[in-house]
Image: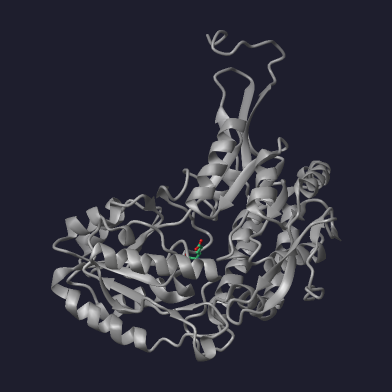
Amino acid sequence: MNLVKEKRLKNYIDGGWIAPKDVRYVDVVNPATGESVAEVPMSTKVEVDAAVEFAKQAQRGWAIVPAPQRAEVLYRVGSLMKERKENLSQLLTTENGKVIEEARGEVQEGIDMAFYMAGEGRRLFGQTTPSELKDKFAMSVRAPVGVVGIITPWNFPIAIATWKSFPAIVAGNAVIWKPASETPLMAHELAAIFAEAGLPKGVLNVVFGSGNTVGNAMVEHKDIRVISFTGSNEVGRNIASKCGQLLKKVSLEMGGKNAVIVMDDADLDLAVEGIIWSAFGTSGQRCTACSRVIVHENVKEHLQERLLKEIKRLKIGNGLDEKVRIGPIINKVSLKKINSYIKIGKEEGANLLTGGYVLDEGEHKNGFYYAPTIFTDVSPNMRIAQEEIFGPVVSLIPVKSFVEAIEVNNNVAYGLSSSIFTKDINKVFAAQRDLDTGIVYVNAGTTGAEIHLPFGGTKGTGNGHRDSGVAALDVFTEWKSIYIDYSGRLQRAQIDVD
Ligand code: UN1
């Protein structure tokens, strides 16, 4: 059952809960109340090295377990997550702050991923290909890579971990996982569920700690052959250059500057709902959050008025309260960063329509809350329209045409998600082709990716890999080409072909 009983968390290494020696502990703070709910150890390279040794050993055995049997563990993990969905969701809200309804949605994402990837245990399709030579058989199969490292963020502490660890495990790898220090409880619970589901020891190892120490030790460890990272652009680039030097495969997902386009033929009620949900849900702390609205000038005034009206209805508070729609921001550092963009926006000449301040009175006194914020009359090159803010701040950018809307959408450094509201079927098809993002929505907001489709984006969002979906297997497997000659002679390829 719920295993977080002791306040001080332990690493999960080689199937055991182990407290690292002589390390400092950091408080895990409930952002809704400011209270410490646990303490997380700041492990060191020593723990990473130990975990990798155990993982290497375990992986050899795990790789020869037939994939359908490896998948059985994931089916059990999915069932246990389903049984504990409510507990996990409450705990997730406690450490991350997201409202309980969204926490349930996130846990559901993990459950879906478990059953979906378990299905891969009976597929993991390879290919057979005709050989150039007689009496020779050629095929390519997906082979596990070995020991892989996953580094996950605080904004989706369980879902993103499942996008990465489940495909890695079903494909026969062993995993070293560094969860974000802000949200270690989900990692603790997922490791406990894996143990209960019968995953052999050493196949999954959780090492808590900072990116600088634990993350770095993972990136630099010669026996960790893949790094899959979701987080900030700055950290991602740093990891990428180190991995480049070491010729290590790295998969990066580093955020977005996602836009909703509202054309003048759009269903405005629907567009308003879509914008409110994708801009202010999760307090804007999603990689997929909408932070720009590109609106046709004919409907600009109307849309602004409608958004303003809807924003006033949003109850902001502790996410455990079912009536609350907007929870807190993860911590004070984030609050400060969001606030700094308000100043930048004003200085750039944007018009602050609503919000733009920290909520710190009454029920909001001890937590980290920010008022949902809208800037209007934003021009596409302003910093508030170019840089990822990761908070409930949205910029309205007026445009004159569909072509201009697409151009503005694409003219940012990121390319994760985009959306268009229109009733014109021609614009729908042109937009899905021309929007330069890894995910495109039509008549829906920018959030809500489903786990059986690839997740990721173009340009500064990543480096060409995808989480989730069957595409995730490409990150965690190597193609192995196998030739079996049954001619009884030495046949020389490209030479003995006549
Ligand atoms: C993220 O913010 O990094 O599509 C993940 C969505 C969610 C996942 C977001 N399913 O918004």
- Residue 291 placement (x, y as % from top left): 36, 66
- Residue 498 placement (x, y as % from top left): 52, 9
Q: Is residue 40 above or below residue 367?
A: above
Q: Residue at x 53, y 90 (%)?
A: 363
- With 229 as the anchor, is 84 left or right in this view? right
Q: Residue at x 52, y 86 (%)?
A: 364
- Residue 157 placement (x, y as % from top left): 61, 65
Q: Is residue 81 above or below residue 67?
A: below
Can you see residue 41? yes
Q: Is residue 279 above or below residue 482?
A: below
Can you see residue 167? no
Determine the image quadrant of residue 444: bottom left
Q: Name the quadrant of the N terminus.
A: bottom right
Q: Residue at x 74, y 59 (%)?
A: 72
Query: As rendered, which of 127 and 353 lies closer to the eye?
Result: 353
- Residue 103 placement (x, y as % from top left): 58, 76
Query: As rendered, which of 121 and 417 lies closer to the eye?
Result: 417
